[in-house]
Amino acid sequence: MNIFRKPILFIFMLGLMFALSCSANKQATYRKSKTLMDTFVTITVVSDSKEKAETSIDNAFTVMERFGNRINFFSEESELSLINKNAGVKEVKVSPETLDLIENAVYVSEKSGGAFDPTIGPLIKLWDFYKKIKPSYTEISGVLHLVNYKNIVIDRNGSTVFLKRKGMLLDLGGIAKGYAADMAVADLKRNGIQAGIVAIAGDIKTFGAKPDGNPWNIGIRNPRQKSESDEVIAKIKLSDMAISTSGDYERYFLQDGKRYHHLLVPRTGRPADCCRSVSIIADKGAFADAFSTAVFILGPEKGLELVQKLGMDAVIIDNNGRILTTQNIKRKIKIERFD
Amino acid sequence: MKDSIKRTTIADRILFLFLIVISISGIFISKEALPQGSDVIIEIDGKPEYTLPLNIDKTISVNGPYGITRIQIKDKKVRIMEAHCPNQLCVKNGWISRGVIVCLPNRILIIVGSGNNPGKDIDAITG
Amino acid sequence: MQSQDKYRIAVFSAYALALHGFESMLPTPIPWLRLGLSNIITLVALLLYGFRTAMTVTLIRVILASIFKGTFLGPAFILSLGGGISSTAVMGFVYALHKKLFGPIGLSLLGALFHNLAQLTLAYFLFIQRIEAVLVISPVIILIGTLTGVVNGIVSELLINMLKKDEEKFQNVAH
C-alpha cells in the first residue's frame, strides 16, 4: 500500500472523492401526473435519462387507461357494464385482466368473510355522497339480497363472468386502482425501469429504491386534517411493497352530527363505524387496496387478526384517533402526531 | 512567527492551499447546487414540523429550548425574525430564498425546498 | 509508564483543560465551532512525547471538561469526543508515517480538518439528518478550521521550540 506512504496523494484523493461525490450520481427521479380512471395518477421513476423515463411513464399511462376503460362502472361500453347489464341473463366474455381482477376480488371477499364484496354496487347506487342522499331502511333492505359475492360465477376456461341474479351490480372500485398499480409497475419493469412509485390517488405501489439507495418514504394521510401542516399522520419506508388506504374522509357527508361515508358494510348497507382510516401494506397492490376496505369494515380487532394471518401489515386509525399497527412494522413506521 | 511560516514544509503549504481552495469553492458550489424551492420546511429536532408555501406571507412561532423563535416568510424569502439563543447567528443570517438556516441551540432547521419533491421527505401520500 | 510520563500527562491535561475552558467562554458564531486551542496542547504532546501521551491528554481533557460542564455522555460530549479522537488519531498516524513531511502547521491543519469532519458526520447522524444542511455548512466550517488551524500550528511550533530550549537549559544545568 504505497499510497499511504504519500499522505499528500492520499489527501488529494480524499478531496477528489469529496468533489466527485456531488456529480457522480446520474440517476435521477422523474415524475409525471395524469387524470386517469377518474382520479389523479402520479408515476415517479428512477432513470438515467429523461426521455427513457418519460416514454416508459407514458406507456404505463396507456396501459392503465386501456384497463380503466374496460372496468369503468359508469361507461356503457365497458366490460364491467356488459357484465352488469347481463346479470341474471347470461355470461359475458371478458379480457384476461378483467377476469383476473374479478378473481382477485372474490378471493378477498372469501378471505374477509364478505367484509369486502364487489357486488356492493346496488347499495352504493342508493347513496349519493355529493348530494347528501341517505337511503331509507326499506330502500336498503330492498337491495341487500343482491349483495353477495357468492353469486359471481367465473369460468376461467371460457374467460366468462356471470352474475346469477338480475339487478346485481359489480363495482370494482375497491380493488381496481390497486390492481392497476400492479399492472403499471409490471409495465415499467418490462421497459427497463428498476425503481419508482405508481400512485393512483391513495393506492400506491413502490418498487426498487430511491437514487440515494433509501426506500421510498410514504406518508399516511391524517384522517382529521385541520391545517396544512398536519396532512400526514405517520410515515413509513417501503420498497417493493404496495400500500393502500381506505378512509371515512374520502367520500362522505355530515348530517345531524353523524358522518356518512362510502365504506358500507355489505350485510347492513350502512357505513362502518369502527375506524377513521385503514392502510394495508402488501406485496400486491390489488390486495392492499381491497383488504384496506375489508379491514375497515371488520374493525381494528378482527381486521388486525386477519391481516396478520395473511402475512400483511396494517396501520389503523381507530375511532378515538389511536394508531394501531401490526407488530411487524412498528419499527418501520414513524408516527408524526396524535390529536 | 515569520520564522514559523518560513519553516513550513512543501506539504504544509500544499495542504493549506488545498483546504482553502476546496472550502471556498465548496461555499460557492453548495450555494449554487441548492434547489430553488417553493416550500419552507421547518424541522424541529430533526422532525419536519411545518411545510409552508414560500409565496404566502406568514409569521409563525415555534417553541424550543430557548423559548419562542419567530420565523417570518415574506416576498418569497424566509428569515428568523426573533430567537433567544445565545449567539443570535440565525437572526443575523437574514433573509434567504434558498438553502437553509440552522439554529442549533434551538434545534431548528429551516429549509427552502420542495415539500413533495423526490429525494425530499415524503415521496407519496396514501389515503 | 514512568513517573515522568504521568507528570507530563497531568501537566498537559491541565493546560488543555484550561484552554478548553477559556475557549468555551469566548463567543463563537456557531455553537459547536471552536477555535480548537486545546489542539495546541495535543499537538505539542504528540511532537514532543509521542502518540500515547497525546491521545491520553485528549481523552482526559474531553472527559473532564464534559464532567465540569455537566454534558458528560450527552450529545455535546459525543461530538467533542469524536472530534478529539479523530483529530489526534489522524495527526498521530500522519506523523508516524513520515516525520518530516508535515510541520506543526500542516499537522494542525489535518487535526482541525478531521476534527470538523468527524463532528459534521456525528452531527448529521445525531441531530440534523438533512444532508443539504450539512453540505452547506461543511465548507464554511472547514474554511474557518483551516484559518484557526494555521494559527494553532504556529503557536504549537513556538511552544515546542520554547520547551525544547528549556529542556536543553535544564540539561545543561544538570550537567
Image (spheres, coloured by chain):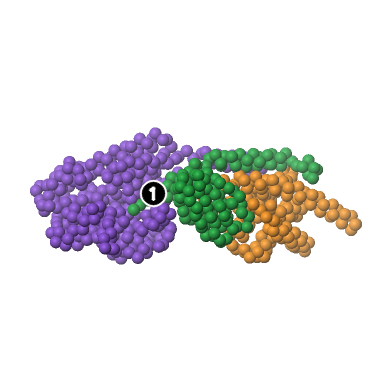
Chain colours: A purple, B green, C orange
Residue A8 image position (x, y, % from top left): 66, 41
Look at 52% across and 51% down and name the residue there.
Answer: B72
Look at 59% across and 48% down and name the residue there.
Answer: B93
Viewer-nearest residue: B63 or C60: B63
Look at the image and tell me whether residue A159 can be seen: no
Residue C145 image position (x, y, % from top left): 66, 48
Q: Quadrant of residue B14?
A: top right
Side (left or right) of A219 relative to A248:
right
**Residue of label 1:** B124
Side (left or right) of A249 relative to C148:
left
Q: Quadrant of residue C143?
A: top right
| Quarter in which the N terminus of chain C is drawn | bottom right
Look at 49% across and 41% down and name the residue there.
Answer: B36
Badge 1 element = strand
Residue A102 image position (x, y, % from top left): 21, 49
- Seen as rendered, the residue at the extreme top is A51
Q: Chain of mark 1?
A: B
Look at 42% across and 60% down and name the residue there.
Answer: A337
Amino acid identity at mark 1: Ala
Viewer-nearest residue: A133 or B6: A133
Side (left or right) of A145 relative to B106:
left
Residue C175 image position (x, y, % from top left): 90, 57
Q: How would you rate the neighbour count of disc 1 (Cα within 10 Å): few for under 14, some for 14-19, many for 20 or more?
A: many
Side (left or right) of B47 relative to C74:
left
Look at the image and tell me whether residue B51 can be seen: yes
